[in-house]
Image (cartoon, coloured by chain):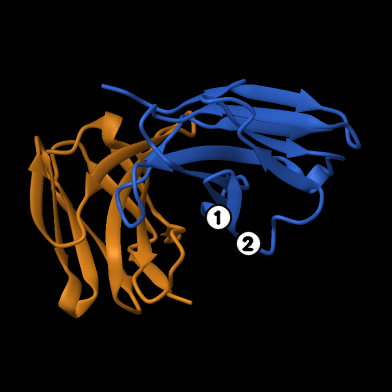
Chain colours: A blue, B orange
């Protein structure tokens, strides 16, 4: 059964450094998402992406964040200058069309020191 | 925006016991999903259930969309069922596709 994959599973970085989190959505899916979960809290929406454009973003998704689909398979989340409070689990998700089930990847745990 | 509540917030069960987890939402939804977050933090998709009833082994779920709630039943619980259970909904009155998660129910199954 196809699944969403994410790399790396765990990333440790120094404050102020740039990180890129990578996701490979399910191959025939068209809609892509990033979510974030700070330890012990609920999962929060960051951004949705369709047709090479951001379709919606939350207040959390400020100028330090960007998303890209650099080729036909990868979907990336870049954090330009990491802060301590960016430490969280980041989940990628995808679906084939809107208002359908979203399939989540296993997550990348980001630790900012 | 839509509000999602889950109850109870915490639950401790003896292995073999049954339980019901509840999700209430404040407005109409296009879809509803139940997830299990395992101790490694992974989100495991349990059910996609915008309405009706589904069963998968010891787990089943029912969503009554008109009354704005969903229930997740766990029967004959096992220690591997421990973790956090999230309900997540997609609001139908917006043109956006984001999923809103509830706060979760933390389940501990003890031998």
Q: Residue furthest front?
A: A51
Taking depth in this image into account, of B48 and B8 the one nearest to the observer is: B48
> Image quadrant of residue A67?
top right
Picture coordinates of residue B73, whole percent (x, y) = 15, 51
Q: Secondary structure at mark 1?
A: strand
Binning the other alpha carbons within 10 Å of mark 2 as few (below 14), some (14 to 19) or many (20 upward) gives few
**Is A51 located above or below residue B22 in the figure?**
above
Picture coordinates of residue A22, whole percent (x, y) = 61, 27
Taking depth in this image into account, of B63 and A94 the one nearest to the observer is: A94
At 28% from the left and 58% from the top, the residue drawn is: B32
Binning the other alpha carbons within 10 Å of mark 1 as few (below 14), some (14 to 19) or many (20 upward) gives many
Quick check: B41 left or right of B27?
right
Instruction: Using the rendered image of the protein, determine whether residue A41 is visible from the camera's viewpoint.
Output: no
At 76% from the left and 25% from the top, the residue drawn is: A12
Q: Quadrant of the C terminus of chain B?
A: top left
Picture coordinates of residue B64, whole percent (x, y) = 14, 70
Taking depth in this image into account, of A111 and A18 the one nearest to the observer is: A18
Picture coordinates of residue A33, whole percent (x, y) = 52, 45
Q: Residue furthest right?
A: A16
Chain letter of disc 1 in the image? A
At 64% from the left and 23% from the top, the residue drawn is: A10
Q: CA distance from mark 1 to mark 2?
A: 9 Å
Q: How many marks?
A: 2
Instruction: Using the rendered image of the protein, determine whether residue B78 is visible from the camera's viewpoint.
Output: yes
Provide the residue designation for mark 2: A58
State if disc 2 and disc 1 touch (CB < 8 Å): yes
Indicate which disc residue A44 carries.
Answer: 1
């Amino acid at each position: 059964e196809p699944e969403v994959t994410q790399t790396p599973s765990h990333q440790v970085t120094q404050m102020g450094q740039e990180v890129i989190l990578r996701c490979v959505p399910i191959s025939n899916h068209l809609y892509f998402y990033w979510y974030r979960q700070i330890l012990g809290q609920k999962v929060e929406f960051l951004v949705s992406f369709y047709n090479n454009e951001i379709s919606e973003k939350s207040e959390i998704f400020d100028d330090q964040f960007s998303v890209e689909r650099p080729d036909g398979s990868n979907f990336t989340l870049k954090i330009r200058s990491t802060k301590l409070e960016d430490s969280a689990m980041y989940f990628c998700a995808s679906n084939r069309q809107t208002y359908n089930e979203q399939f989540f990847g296993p997550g990348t745990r980001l630790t900012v020191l | 925006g839509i509000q999602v509540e889950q109850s109870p917030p915490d639950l401790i069960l003896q292995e073999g016991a049954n339980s019901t987890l509840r999700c209430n939402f404040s407005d109409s939804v296009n879809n509803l999903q139940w997830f299990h977050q395992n101790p490694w933090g992974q989100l495991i998709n349990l059910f996609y259930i915008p309405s009706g009833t589904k069963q998968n082994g010891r787990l089943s779920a029912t969503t009554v969309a008109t009354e704005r709630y969903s229930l997740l039943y766990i029967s004959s619980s096992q220690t591997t069922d421990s973790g956090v259970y999230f309900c997540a909904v997609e609001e139908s009155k917006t043109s956006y596709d984001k999923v809103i998660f509830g706060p979760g129910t933390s389940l501990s199954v003890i031998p």
